Each structure stands twice: as C-alpha cells, then as structure tokens.
Amino acid sequence: MNWKKWLDEFVLAGKGILLAAREKRFWYGFIPSFFFFGLLMNLLAGGTSKFELMGILGFPQSLRIIGESLLAIFGVNQPFLDWLPIFAISILQGILIGIIVLLWNKKKAQNAANLEKAGIITGLIALGAGCPTCGATLITPLLGAIFSTGGLAIAGTISTIVTILAIIIAILALKRLGVETYVIIVNEKYLARKSEKEQL
C-alpha cells in the first residue's frame, strides 16, 4: 500500500472539505444533519427510555427533554467521554451530508450511491453508538437469550466495534468525496478565470 499517496489524498480531501465549507449549499446539508443526528444520538442514549418518558409526560415536558438533548450535543451536563464520540460522529455525518448536498447538482449520476453510503453509515452508528445507547438496547436481548448474563458485556463490545467501523467508513467516504469536491471546485474556478480572460 502506498502510504504517501493515501496521505496526499487525505490532504486533498481536507482541502476539498475546506473549499466546500465556503459554499452555502454545504451548510444547508451540514447544519440540519448535525443537529438531527446529535439530537437522535442523545435521545437514544440509555436506549428508548427517553422516548418512553416523552410519551408518558406529554408535550411540554417532551420539549424540555428535547431541549436538554440539543444542549447535550455541545457537552452541557455531559461527561466528556460520553459527549466526545456523539459530537465527533455528528460532525462526521454533518460533513458527509453537507458535501453530498453540495455536489448534488454537480454529479447527479453518483448521488444515489453517495446517499446510500451515508445511510449505511447512519445505520451502523445508530446500531452501535456505544453501551448503553440504542445499539446495546437492540443487541442485548438477543445476546442475553444466547449467552445469559454475559449478554450486556458482549453487546457493549459489539456496539463499540460497530461504532468504530462506522467511523472508519465515514472517514473513508469523506476522503473520496473530499478529493472529488476539491477537483470539481478547483476546476470550476479555473474555468471561470479562463472564461473571464477570454472575455477581455
């Protein structure tokens, strides 16, 4: 494996993401995705208990729970080690969706594949966001039936592995899309400058 080439591609991808961040359409995808995903992960922390509580308490108290979960995205009343993975995942997902939105009209043929990959990453992260989040909640009953009392520990390990896998896939997807974004934006700027010179 050519590590120098990989590093160069990551550098180009970083430049592509920075160039994308200068475009309004990037933020149209990033901001709602970041908040939605961060909110969802914080609501699912501890399984489905917050949703069950919201169903019991009614609308006003449900808004309070949603508000607290939104603040938790930025670490308010959250232990650092619980907050950091959710924040990092939300950032990654937001960037991924932001770039896809930016490139939507530029590369229509690949949009379905990009959105499918983003959906797979979302599903993996939701499934394995770390014990005791929803991943452990979904996995524990199944493993508990098979392995009895060891099910929770195994579910926690599996959910951590799935989360790491999802983050790796997200980073690799961002590398590819970041390089693509860099090439497209730099090419657009070159063509724009060339057109201006020709008109002079």
Image (tube, rainbow, N blue to C red):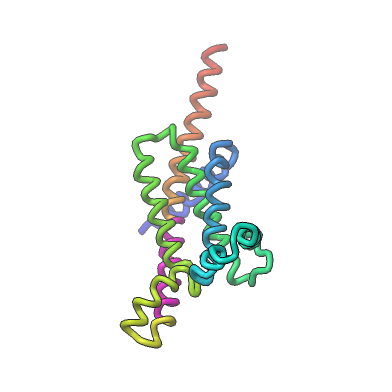
**Residue furthest toward the left?**
146
Q: Is residue 151 left or right of residue 68?
A: left
Residue 22 painted magenta: no
Picture layout, residue 10 above or below residue 151 = above
Q: Position of residue 168 (x, y in %)?
A: 43, 61
Residue 42 appears anywhere in the view: no
Residue 161 painted magenta: yes
Of 92 and 50, nearer the camera is: 50
> Which residue is located at x 49 percent, y 38 percent?
102
Determine which quarter of the picture holds residue 85. bottom right
Identify the image quadrant of the N terminus: bottom left
Q: Main secondary structure of the magenta part?
A: helix
Q: Position of residue 63 (x, y in %)?
A: 63, 57
Of 176 and 70, nearer the camera is: 70
The magenta stretch spans which residues?
Answer: 154-170
> Which residue is located at x 55 percent, y 17 percent?
197
Identify the image quadrant of the C terminus: top right
Q: Is residue 105 left or right of residue 65?
A: left
Picture layout, residue 196 above or below residue 104 = above
Of 164 and 199, nearer the camera is: 164
Q: Is residue 77 left or right of residue 50?
A: right
Picture layout, residue 173 above or below residue 195 = below
Residue 51 appears anywhere in the view: yes
Q: Position of residue 174 (x, y in %)?
A: 46, 50
**Residue furthest toward the top?**
200
Q: Position of residue 119 (x, y in %)?
A: 40, 52
